[in-house]
Image: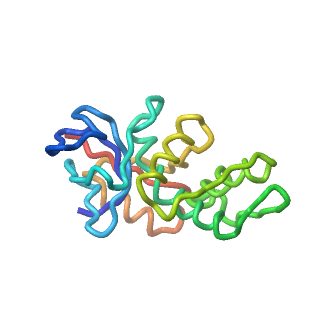
């Protein structure tokens, strides 16, 4: 199953898992084996997963990692600070809109330090805090049920997509 960003509810937890409990609402990112377009997904306790902010639903939280990670990586690499002026070309897309939101506090003189090496659990938790406080909201273009995934991919390939596409997997 394709897909790498996900949101859902913990259905079971392995022996010794202490960070998550059955029933927790979680979101995150899986790369390599993919699998987020499935009804069930296995994620390591120390994987790229965090408890969802209580004010978000699954569709709002699911697209909150991958594109934001790309934007954050570019912001960190460019060492953007309050003395800089930044233009984001393509700010209506998923990565561009995340870049605008994530860079805005830095450009306004508010000191924000991003000290996360790559997309790991700490970064996912960082995005959870930003989404919970309203400092970051993933841009969602369209939502598709899993049964229409072919249509979703066709739409993405048109080059007309603005933001994220959310695939809803209902049990």
- Can you name the residue that lies furthest to the top here? 55
In this rendered view, identify the residue nearer to me: 30 or 146: 30
Q: The N terminus is located in which quarter?
A: bottom left
In this rendered view, identify the residue nearer to me: 93 or 28: 28
In this rendered view, identify the residue nearer to me: 136 or 45: 45
The relative height of residue 113 versus residue 17 in the rendered view (above or below) is below
Q: Is residue 108 left or right of residue 95?
A: right
Q: Which residue corresponds to the image point at 46% horizontal and 59% vertical from the top-left?
A: 66
The relative height of residue 59 versus residue 75 in the rendered view (above or below) is above
Q: Is residue 83 left or right of residue 110?
A: right
Q: Quadrant of residue 150?
A: bottom left
Q: Which residue corresponds to the image point at 81% horizontal and 55% vertical from the top-left?
A: 82
Q: Position of residue 95 (x, y in %)?
A: 57, 61
Q: Position of residue 162 (x, y in %)?
A: 56, 57
Q: Which residue corresponds to the image point at 49% horizontal and 42% vertical from the top-left?
A: 128
Q: Position of residue 7 (x, y in %)?
A: 34, 45
Q: Which residue corresponds to the image point at 25% horizontal and 32% vertical from the top-left?
A: 23
The relative height of residue 37 versus residue 135 in the rendered view (above or below) is below
In this rendered view, identify the residue nearer to me: 11 or 47: 47
Q: Position of residue 117 (x, y in %)?
A: 51, 64
- Can you name the residue that lies furthest to the left here? 15
Q: Is residue 82 left or right of residue 113?
A: right
Q: The C terminus is located in which quarter?
A: top left
């Amino acid at each position: 199953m394709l897909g790498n960003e996900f949101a859902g509810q913990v259905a079971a937890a392995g022996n010794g898992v202490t960070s998550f409990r059955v029933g927790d609402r979680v979101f995150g990112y899986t790369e390599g084996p993919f699998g987020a377009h499935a009804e069930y997904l296995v994620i390591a306790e120390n994987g790229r997963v965090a408890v969802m902010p209580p004010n978000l639903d699954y569709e709002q939280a699911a697209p909150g990692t991958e594109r934001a990670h790309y934007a954050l990586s570019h912001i960190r690499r460019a060492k953007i600070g309050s003395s800089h002026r930044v233009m984001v070309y393509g700010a209506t897309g998923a990565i561009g809109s995340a870049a605008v939101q994530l860079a805005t506090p830095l450009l306004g003189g508010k000191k924000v330090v991003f000290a996360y090496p790559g997309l790991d659990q700490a970064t996912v938790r960082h995005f959870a805090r930003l989404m919970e406080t309203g400092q970051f909201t993933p841009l969602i273009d369209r939502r598709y049920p899993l049964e229409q995934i072919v249509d979703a991919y066709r739409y993405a390939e048109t080059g007309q997509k603005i933001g994220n596409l959310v695939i809803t997997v209902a049990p």
